[in-house]
Amino acid sequence: MVSGRPGNGELDAWFNSLMVSSSNQRGQAESGDPLPTLSGWKDLPVELLLRILSFVGDDRMVIVASGVCTGWRDALGWGVTNLSLSWCKQNMNSLMISLAHKFTKLQVLTLRQNKPQLEDSAVEVVANYCHDLRELDLSRSFRLSDRSLYALAHGCPRLTRLNISGCSNFSDTALTYLTCRCKNLKCLNLCGCGKAASDSALQAIAQNCGQLQSLNLGWCDNITDKGVTSLASGCPDLRAVDLCGCVLITDESVVALANGCPHLRSLGLYFCQNITDRAMYSLANSRVKSKCGRWDAVKDGLANLNISQCTALTPPAVQAVCNSFPALHTCPDRHSLIISGCLSLTSVHCACALHPHRAGRALLPNHAY
């Protein structure tokens, strides 16, 4: 935004003035008098133009407005920091190429698709013009190749959130290169990126992205304990880790996360069938070591745990986790301990059953990205 921007009172005065002018035009038209030229709209302050468009609440109108005149195009180019093209059902690639040079101050860009449209050429244009980008969603971009990651590494080094879930063509070499240049990443979604999410890539993430807080590795079935233990060591601020479908990991991964990531709030272990009671007891004991079992520090503990299809687990071990983390719930309205497919765990209960007065505590948010 520009400095010295007008206050709300001035913006309201501008808007009222324009509305009065428009009203006068209509009145004169009805009386047969000649219509005066209304030139005020092109001189709107950036803040007022953005306010008007915010009332519409549709990024399509922002795009239309950017083509009205050069003044509006330039104003929106400086003022718009958040843009989504997820509504675009076809030709998203060419649309993004035509828009990138107009919106050079974008910080949040969502290009999520229902069917693959986006190609490397569009991502390269984004990287060439949108150097302030902080958050980018490229999920389900099946056509993208390593060219896109290399372009982002060079053009968007300030990225803090990146969603490339379902981008199955990326390699671990390109992902490693990206992490060497985008070292401010805090949230990274690699779900379904089986080629990119290798142990060597996780080691690079651990080495370069020490601020990482959320990592989705769902169905990256080449990952082993080697990669996860590196993450636990290099990214101690991890809050949410999804390892669902990572069938090669064992208790070693969970033990490393329990000991190395004291702020862990959400852990997904769906279908990790090598997980045993040892992993559960390591989680329970990490709570005791970090908080001495204090109930008044619920906000610092594990709040979401998915152990569905982890059929080797026994009730005492899982109950120990529940006892250590009262934010984990098995009650229907607050289900945050997911045990689907584990018939032996039906006796596990959350703290609400024994301490009803604690059930009134505020619900904790799910931090999974």
Image (cartoon, rainbow, N blue to C red):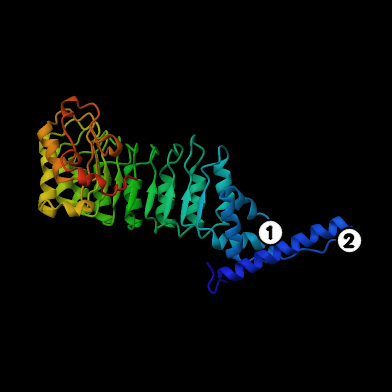
Of 134 and 268, which appears nearest the observer? Answer: 268
Residue type highlighted by circle 2: Asp
Residue extending farthest to the front is: 357
Q: Secondary structure at mark 1?
A: loop
Up the image or down, 110 lies above or below 117; here it is below
Q: Secondary structure at mark 2?
A: loop
Residue shown at the point (32%, 55%) measured from the top left: 180
Q: Earlier in the sequence, mark 1 or mark 2?
A: 2
Res 321 → quadrant: top left
The reply to whether residue 10 is in sight is: yes
Of 74 and 262, which appears nearest the observer? Answer: 262
Q: CA distance from mark 1 to mark 2?
A: 28 Å
The reply to whether residue 279 is in sight is: no
Percent coordinates x, y for residue 69 in the rendering: 68, 59
The answer to whether the residues at label 1 and label 2 have Cβ atoms under 8 Å apart is no
Up the image or down, 304 lies above or below 10; here it is above
Res 68 → quadrant: bottom right
Q: Quadrant of the C terminus?
A: top left
Picture disc at residue 69:
1
Provide the residue designation for mark 2.
33
Percent coordinates x, y for residue 198 in the rendering: 27, 41
Asked if residue 170 lies left or right of residue 78, the reply is left
